[in-house]
Image (cartoon, rainbow, N blue to C red):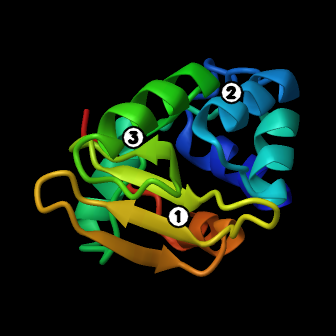
Amino acid sequence: MHAFADFASKWSHPAYAPEPVLAADLMRAEEQLAGRLPADYRDAIVSIGLPRPTGALLHSVCEEQADFADVADFLSADEMISSTQAWREMGLREDMIAFASDCMGNLFAFVGAPPNPSSAVWFFDHETGETTLVAPSFRDWIQRYLDLRFIPLDD
């Protein structure tokens, strides 16, 4: 997915390449979480890796007063398993699989219902327990960050 590569380029530090992801690790996560990840997400992170957004993304979201949360971390397969399992015990829907978090520890998740998981992105607010649809697809979700103006952190 070209947009995901653009996201990694725009919001990650050039000295820190995205963390590689193996398809086998994602399959293990899907098995343990009894769900499936959307194909466009799987393809993107296997081909690009997991970007590690810098503080510039949060800064830009705040400065632009965007009506969406930042992305602080994309979860590895092991983090996906542990976060999803832990938050399911505290209110995350059983059919959801967490794949990223914001700076406050809230989660971004997919509905992983087999055989055709949706690539719609949901936001789980851990303080309220509410789950809200934030984008109709993974591609649309990534695009909002690409459309966001990059505002460098003050030195």
Residue at which label 2 appears: 18
- Disc 3 is placed on an element classified as loop
Residue at which label 3 appears: 72
In whole angstroms, how far apart are the C-alphas of marks 3 and 1?
12 Å
In whole angstroms, how far apart are the C-alphas of marks 2 and 1?
17 Å
Residue at horizontal 66 percent and vertical 61 percent from the top: 113
In whole angstroms, how far apart are the C-alphas of marks 2 and 3?
14 Å
Image coordinates of residue 140 in percent, x first then y, are: 64, 75
- Disc 2 is placed on an element classified as loop
Residue 39 in view, yes or no:
yes
In the image: residue 72, left or right of residue 62 = right
Q: Quadrant of the N terminus?
A: bottom right
The number of numbered discs placed on residues in the rendered structure image is 3
- Badge 1: few (under 14), some or many (20 or more) residues near its Cα, within 10 Å? many
Residue at which label 1 appears: 145
- Disc 1 is placed on an element classified as helix
Image coordinates of residue 76 in percent, x first then y, are: 59, 26
In the image: residue 58, left or right of residue 139 = left
Image coordinates of residue 25 in percent, x first then y, are: 76, 22
Residue at horizontal 62 percent and vertical 18 percent from the top: 15
Which residue occupies the foreground of this view, 123 or 116? 116
Image coordinates of residue 24 in percent, x first then y, are: 85, 23
Q: Amino acid at mark 1?
A: Tyr
Q: Amino acid at mark 2?
A: Pro
